[in-house]
Image (cartoon, rainbow, N blue to C red):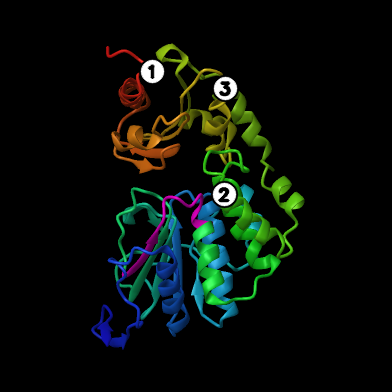
Amino acid sequence: PVRQNRDGMAFPQPPTADNKDERDYGAKIRRIAEALRAWDGPVVLVSHVDPDGDALGSTLALKRALEALGKTTLLPLTPPRFLAFLAEPGELSGPLERLPEGCLLAVLDVADEPRALGAPLVGAAFTINIDHHGTNGRFGDLFCVEPSKAATAHIVKDVIDALGVAWDARIATPCLTGIITDTGNFRYSNTTHEVLEAAGQLIDCGVDYAALTDRLQWRHPSYFEMLGKVMGTVTFPLGGLVVMAHMTSAMETEVGDADDSNDYVGLIRYAEGSKVAVFLKAREDHTKLSVRTRDGVSAQRICMALGGGGHVAAAGAKVEADLEETQRRVLAASRAELERHGLLHPA
């Protein structure tokens, strides 16, 4: 069978196209591996805007595994400063103006298509979607969306196993990074026996675990300067069930690039008695928010009410409103979710 690219030229189609009716996880992994092995053209890997450890770790591990098979790959991704050490010089590229002809597009850790970064999602000869967000739209010619997995990197590990590539520290290090960061250094509720076993297998490939976990905690001095300002904004609304902090453009202008400012929500989430932690980054025309929850309270529900999405315990959204209005909306959504759990009486 053949398909056509944007210029009407025919190209081979992988023999395992369309797994939308496939329910078995292992079968999905095998079909994706078969398609990747069979692909003769370039492979472009993309992930979401503001890439985190899972976004970079999963794409970089799969890129290196595919190159071990002799594939031509492109990874248009700009990581935050604290993760840049994972990539080798020249290994990442800037945004692409257009996709290479006849390319396979691998979209990793992206819950919805508009959040893919680095290349347009139109014009690909074939698209593979690998993700662990429950809100993923199951787009692509082949997909494996498995919310039970702690990280997309965990799914990628299974894909690389199915590819039959020989593991080494160079491939295992970014893969393990994705698992470490999305489990909060194995502190979050998504830390299971399965994910710990997968991490152990990756460490056995030669990863210097102590050096990696230490390096992942490094932050630029501006991070700590900004931290002082952010901590000065902390409030405890709804009787302390919510802890909230924010960062403004003016604060960034004064301090400079705070590097991994998303870390801040991970700090305030440990406020005693809180069920919902909210960190807001105010911009001129919108406000971005990160939400973390515990004890079954759903960050996903809160953020979906604001046009975003994510996981039950960790989610985010972009709100087309200023900081004050966004705070009002996120508190209303948080109140509704806390009332649903019987933690607040209806107003």
Q: Is residue 314 magenta?
A: no
* Magenta-tinted stretch: 141-153
Q: Quadrant of the C terminus?
A: top left
Q: Is residue 150 magenta?
A: yes
Q: Quadrant of the N terminus?
A: bottom left
Question: How far across and down, in percent of the image, does residue 318 sit?
Answer: 35, 39
Question: Mark 1, mark 2: which one is toward the viewer?
Answer: 1
Q: Tell me if label 1 and label 3 are in contact, CB under 8 Å.
A: no
Left or right: 229 in relation to 211: left
Q: Picture quarter containing residue 288?
A: top left
- For marks 1 and 3 on the same chain, the one whose residue lies earlier in the sequence: 3
Q: Which residue carries the number 3 mark?
A: 231
Q: Which residue carries the number 1 mark?
A: 343
Residue at the left extreme, as displayed: 8
Amino acid carrying mark 3 in the image: Met
For the residue labelled by badge 3, is the local secondary structure a helix, a strand or a loop? helix
Question: Mark 1, mark 3: which one is toward the viewer?
Answer: 1
Question: How far across and down, in percent of the image, does residue 253 sit?
Answer: 52, 33
Amino acid carrying mark 2 in the image: Pro
Amino acid carrying mark 1 in the image: Leu
Q: Which residue carries the number 2 mark?
A: 80
